Image (spheres, helix red, strand yellow):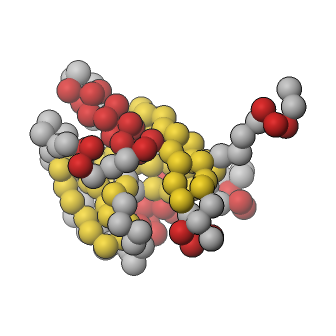
Amino acid sequence: MTTKQKDIYFVAVKVFLEKNGKLLILKDNFGDWDLPGGRILKDEFYTSLDQIIKRKMSEELGKNIKYVIGKPIVFMRHKRIEQIFGNPIVKIFAIGYEGILKNRNIKLSKRHSKIMWVDPNTFKPEKYFKGGWLKGVQEYIKLKKSKYDLR
């Protein structure tokens, strides 16, 4: 195998966070809808994924957020333009975890402009998401509708 055959991906963790049957989605500063979570940092190679999720949840939803993370249920590949780095296209491989919010103490970060709770049974993700995030949310909804137990 040559290096030409290999590709470079960022790795991220995302959380399909629910409360009372509703799914949390966030709008970022670039105008894209997203799920809580994000990329693993360079110095987190030996950090557990649970700790990375904890960091991302705290950064994006506030230090007082209380939640329970389940197992990985959806794997996503997403391409996006990195507007803050001169607009190169980056590829992200993301592990999507199930999650349950235990309180409503959400304090949205400055990286996000809007929060919305949606009903997975009636939500139309194609109106909000694109690329790999859309495919991941569609897969999650399909799992929900097939009576996949998230609790």
Image location of residue 68, percent across then percent down: 36, 48
**Image check: 104 left or right of 83?**
left
Residue at 24%, 30% in the rendered image: 144
Visible in this render: residue 90?
A: yes
Visible in this render: residue 65?
A: no
Specify the quadrant that holds the N terminus: top right
Residue closest to the eye, 83 or 110: 83
Residue at 25%, 44% in the rendered image: 125
Image location of residue 118, percent across then percent down: 18, 50
Residue positioned most to the left: 122
Image location of residue 28, percent across then percent down: 38, 66
- Quarter of the image holding residue 150? top left
- Quarter of the image holding residue 151? top left
Residue closest to the eye, 45 or 126: 126
**Image check: 10 left or right of 20?**
right
Relative height, residue 139 to residue 58 (above, below): above
Image location of residue 93, percent across then percent down: 57, 42
Residue at 39%, 38% in the rendered image: 136
Residue closest to the eye, 21 or 124: 124
Relative height, residue 150 to residue 54 (above, below): above
